[in-house]
Image (cartoon, rainbow, N blue to C red):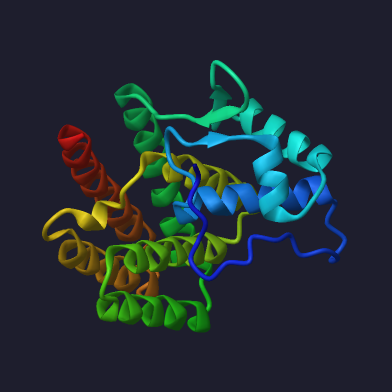
Amino acid sequence: MARRPEGSSGTIARGGGVALGEAVFRSLCEALQAGSYRAGDRLREEEVARRLKVSRTPVREALGRLAARGFVAPAGGRGLIVRNLDISEVLELYAMREIMEGAAARLAAEHASPPEIDALRDIEQAFVEANDAAEMARLNRGFHETICRAARNRYLDNASRELQDWIALLGPTTFTVTGRPRTSHGEHQAIIAAIAARDGDKAEQLARAHIREALRCRLKLLQKQ
């Protein structure tokens, strides 16, 4: 049974020019990122439709899109199951993430506005003050999304968003690893400083090293499973 985010109504907001099938798809992707659905959870059309208060047709469309992207797979009966990535997929995912985060940091060093750099500092301050791993993970996503937007490259931004959906399938955040919040904070600070100094080479180098350290922590978590 999938978990629902605490305090969420679980309904789809109408309007805004977004087709209902697209709205359901986005809602399910957001639920993956929030940890409401995790690897091994079963998704059934009727349950999702009931929770989101929509008909089964847009849910079927959204689940089909998730299956086409490889996020879910047939469950051997009714419904679909959220996939669990194997170790080779995890390594491939982080290899691509390292390349993309490095490119985003380099481009952000060229294009980020002063308000965007201030926003990165504000997010990092909130990260330091956060008192649980889930909140740290949410702020960390905001940190990397802000860098990607500052890169001023729509294709990189779109690819990064899809990558975040895949990362959501990995389960517990790496901020549950002892010492990772502290080291991540130091890495974030160094990346911000390089972007503010307009040093693209250093920003890319630091961002790539940051992702390699995140992978090291991810592998620690996987070894415990």
Image position of 131 (left or right of 16): left
User: Between residues 206 and 97, which one lies in front from this camera angle?
Assistant: 97
Q: Position of residue 136 (x, y in %)?
A: 32, 67
User: Between residues 94 and 100, which one lies in front from this camera angle?
Assistant: 94
Q: Which residue is drawn at the image coordinates 17% and 53% (left, top)? A: 177
Q: Is residue 94 above or below residue 188?
A: above
Q: Quadrant of residue 59?
A: top right
The quadrant in which the C terminus is found is top left
Q: Position of residue 156 (x, y in %)?
A: 57, 48
Q: Which residue is drawn at the image coordinates 43% and 83% (left, top)? A: 118
Q: Position of residue 106 (x, y in %)?
A: 42, 57
Q: Position of residue 52 (x, y in %)?
A: 70, 54
User: Between residues 181 and 103, which one lies in front from this camera angle?
Assistant: 181
- Label total for image: 0
User: Between residues 51 and 216, which one lies in front from this camera angle?
Assistant: 51
Q: Quadrant of residue 170?
A: top left
Q: Is residue 188 visible?
A: yes
Q: Which residue is drawn at the image coordinates 25% and 75% (left, top)? A: 131
Image position of 175 (left or right of 108): left
Q: Is residue 224 above or below residue 175?
A: above
